[in-house]
Amino acid sequence: MSTMGSDPRTSGLLAGVRVVEVSQNAAVPQCARLLAGMGADVVKVEPPGGDAMRHLAPIAENESRAFASINPGKRAIVLDLTDDATRPVIDRLIEWADILLIGLKRTDFERYGLHWDRVKTVKPSLVSLEFTAFGPIGPDADRGGYDPLIQGASGLGWSMNRSVDDTPLATRPAFIDFGSGGYAAAAVLAALRHAERTGEGQRVDASLLGTALALGTPLMSGFAPDAERTAGLREELALLREAGTGFEDQRSHYEANLVALGGLYRLYVRPYQTSDGLISLAGYSPGLMTRFHELTGVERIPASATGDDPTSRAIVEQAEALFATRTTADWLAELTAIGYPCSPYNTPHEAIRTEQVEANGYVVDLDHEVYGEHRVVGMPFSFSDAPVGVTTAAPSLGQHTAEVLGELGFSPDEIAG
């Protein structure tokens, strides 16, 4: 593991790589966050009112914990992209950068002079990420959208969303946003390698919808039944909807007939209520399933059974009643002893205080100039001989505008103007 105390900005694998981020909210900022954690110099361009995340549950003017958690390790400048007078600044930023990260509606790329056909003439070796909600082509290409919208459009929400009063609620945190940041980072680094080898830049297209489908790979493909069964299930769901059946009953019918998988997610891979809390189990292999039955004495669900038949329900209820008789610590000890994957079922606030999380640098404590010390997520990976890490708190609005413009060659009078 790398020495996380070293400064990635001076000796990280991306030290010297220059990144300009033109985006708000979470997906593209997360991509920039990862690049900054590997040492890249990230300049975040915000509108005069600031990134929208600065105003989500604010704790001070232009400051929120949401913004601070997503944007550490960056420098921040303010530019009004709607004003043509800022175009020379944009062009110098493009000339300065190795990577340009843009998260806008597709129609705004050209409006702000940031579309690929233009930026590649400003700097032919530039890597430019054009990130959209629905992808660069097709009937929905020009539509904007956020993570909860894509949860619904992609089908992931159908399987993941909790419901209140039979109405599904978007899953939090915005996992499609943050997954997009990781996928986009991998793509732009591949394009950067190509640019360094050939001198040729590359446009990278990525989207929330593309990420959602990738995150749902098993549901979208690997576990899909035959076409005849799928068509029949669609007809059954249509009849349930016409009859006014609620969301949870529709989903139960769907999962019982499509995702039953021999009781996998009803017995072996799920949380159980214990006598003093919750425990999470995840035993996917046949060998682990056998150990589960040997330990608990619970019967197997017949392979031919659907998820909602009486036999399945009785077996699941037997397992649930058994786990409720002992403490979480007792079950952790028993399951660990037989090698069955298990863990406490933590709240987020419990998880970020665990010894395992802290030991790996997955969280870091930073000192923010407005509200002091706070804990944020660190880097999700490390290298053997190079530092990674989140080293500075998120910048205040426009904190580095004069500094960056000076580096771009603008005079003090021009900067003041």
Image (tube, helix red, strand yellow):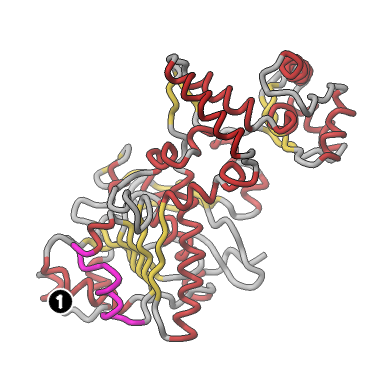
Picture coordinates of residue 268 (x, y %)? 75, 32
x%, y% of residue 152? Answer: 42, 36
For this orientation, the residue located farthest to the front is 228
> Where does the image place residue 23, in percent across and percent down from the top left?
31, 57
Residue at x 58% of width, y 48% of height = 217
Quadrant location of the N terminus in the rendered image: bottom right
Whether residue 135 is situated above or below residue 60 in the rendered picture: below
- Residue at 57% x, 68% y: name it: 387
Closest to the observer: 120 or 407? 120
**Residue linked to disc 1:** 412
The number of numbered badges drawn on the structure is: 1
Q: Residue drawn 44% across and 39% down?
A: 151
Residue that lies at the very extreme toward the bottom in this rendered image:
198
Q: Is residue 386 left or right of residue 402?
A: right
Name the residue: 43% across, 49% down: 209
Depth check: 256 or 26 in front? 256
Q: Is residue 19 magenta?
A: no
Of 70 and 178, the residue lying toward us: 178
State the extent of the magenta-drawn residues as a range.
Answer: 110-124
* Displayed quadrant of residue 44: bottom left
Crowd rating for badge 1 (residues with CA inside 10 Å; few <14, some 14–19, many 20+): few
Left or right, 140 with respect to 13, comes to left
Residue 287 in percent (x, y) is at 86, 40
Amino acid under disc 1: Pro
Q: Main secondary structure of the magenta part?
A: helix
- Name the element at disc 1: helix
Q: Is residue 116 magenta?
A: yes
Q: Quadrant of residue 243?
A: top left
Q: Nearer the viewer, residue 334 or 370?
A: 334
